[in-house]
Image (tube, helix red, strand yellow):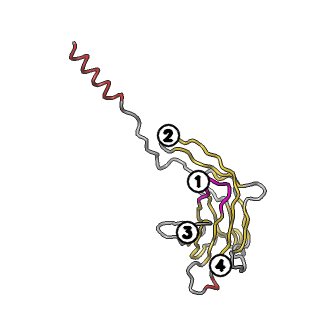
């Protein structure tokens, strides 16, 4: 009887140290990026691909990287907002790296927003949702070297950035 009791006691102690794995599931929603879709200014219902677009956050040297490249060729991009500030600026450089410097054009968008930290789980930690400012969601300026802005019209589609399944900002050029 003593042996059975000791065996049961040993088994119960061996399982008492077990706990659920702290692994964040890849499908868990985390801090969303702002989704931007580009459109043709002459036909506003048609998405338009940008060519060799490089997006660099203010104060950074490297651009936002997608699939191993920091050049974007497509009609939709996603950019991360700062989780520790209520404002961030990005330099959108069209035709980056073109040998004809007259074709390279840089515009700056500064986004103003509020943040809400939400606890997801012990494994995933917190995520941050963003709400663009209702009165001044962004400021659109030309680069330090003035030329014509390549972004002709910028429109907020969704003020609340809680997922990456929808377009938040539309840029027409």
**Are dots 1 and 2 in contact, CB under 8 Å?**
no
* Left or right for 27, reference 48: left
Label 4 element class:
strand
Earlier sequence position, callout 3 versus callout 2: 3
35 over 55 or under it: above or below: above
The image shows residue 126 at horizontal and vertical percentages of 55, 45
Instruction: Judge depth for marks 1 and 4 and give the one in front.
Output: 4
Against 58, is 112 above or below? Answer: above
- Mark 1 and mark 2: span between their CA atoms? 19 Å
**C-beta proximity under 8 Å, tags 4 and 2:** no
Report which residue position mark 3 lands on: 63
Alpha-carbon distance for marks 3 and 2?
32 Å
State left or right for residue 147 relative to residue 121. right
Q: Which residue is mark 1?
A: 32
Using the numbered discs, state the Cα–Cα distance from disc 3 to disc 4 in whole angstroms: 15 Å
Tag 1 or tag 3, which sits nearer the N-term? 1
Q: CA distance from mark 1 to mark 4?
A: 28 Å
User: Which is more N-terminal, label 4 or label 3?
Assistant: 3
Q: Is residue 141 magenta?
A: no
Q: Quadrant of the N terminus?
A: top left
Which of the marked residues, 1 or 4, is nearer the chain's N terminus?
1
**Residue shown at the point (72%, 62%) measured from the top left:** 138
Residue that badge 2 annotates: 122
Residue in the image at 65% along x and 53% along y: 161
Nearer the observer: mark 1 or 2; the answer is 2
Give the residue number, with chain letter if any, for mark 4.
105
- The disc at residue 101 is none
Magenta region, residue range: 80-88
Q: At x 36% / y 28%, what residue is drawn?
A: 16
Sequence-earlier tag: 4 or 2? 4
Q: Main secondary structure of the magenta part?
A: loop
């Amino acid at each position: 009887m003593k042996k059975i009791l000791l065996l049961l006691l040993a088994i119960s102690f061996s399982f008492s140290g077990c706990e659920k794995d702290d692994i964040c599931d890849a499908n868990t929603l985390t801090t969303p990026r702002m989704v931007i879709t580009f459109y043709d200014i002459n036909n506003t219902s048609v998405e338009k691909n940008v060519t060799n677009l490089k997006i660099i956050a203010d104060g950074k040297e490297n651009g936002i990287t997608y699939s191993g490249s920091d050049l974007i060729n497509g009609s939709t991009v996603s950019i991360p907002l700062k989780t520790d500030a209520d404002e961030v600026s990005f330099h959108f450089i069209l035709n980056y790296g073109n040998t004809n410097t007259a074709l390279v054009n840089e515009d700056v968008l500064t986004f103003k927003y509020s943040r809400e930290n939400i606890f997801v789980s012990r494994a995933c930690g917190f995520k941050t949702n963003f709400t663009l400012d209702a009165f001044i969601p962004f400021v659109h300026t030309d680069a330090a070297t003035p030329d014509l802005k390549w972004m002709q019209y910028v429109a907020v589609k969704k003020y609340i950035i809680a997922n990456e399944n929808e377009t938040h900002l539309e840029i027409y050029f």
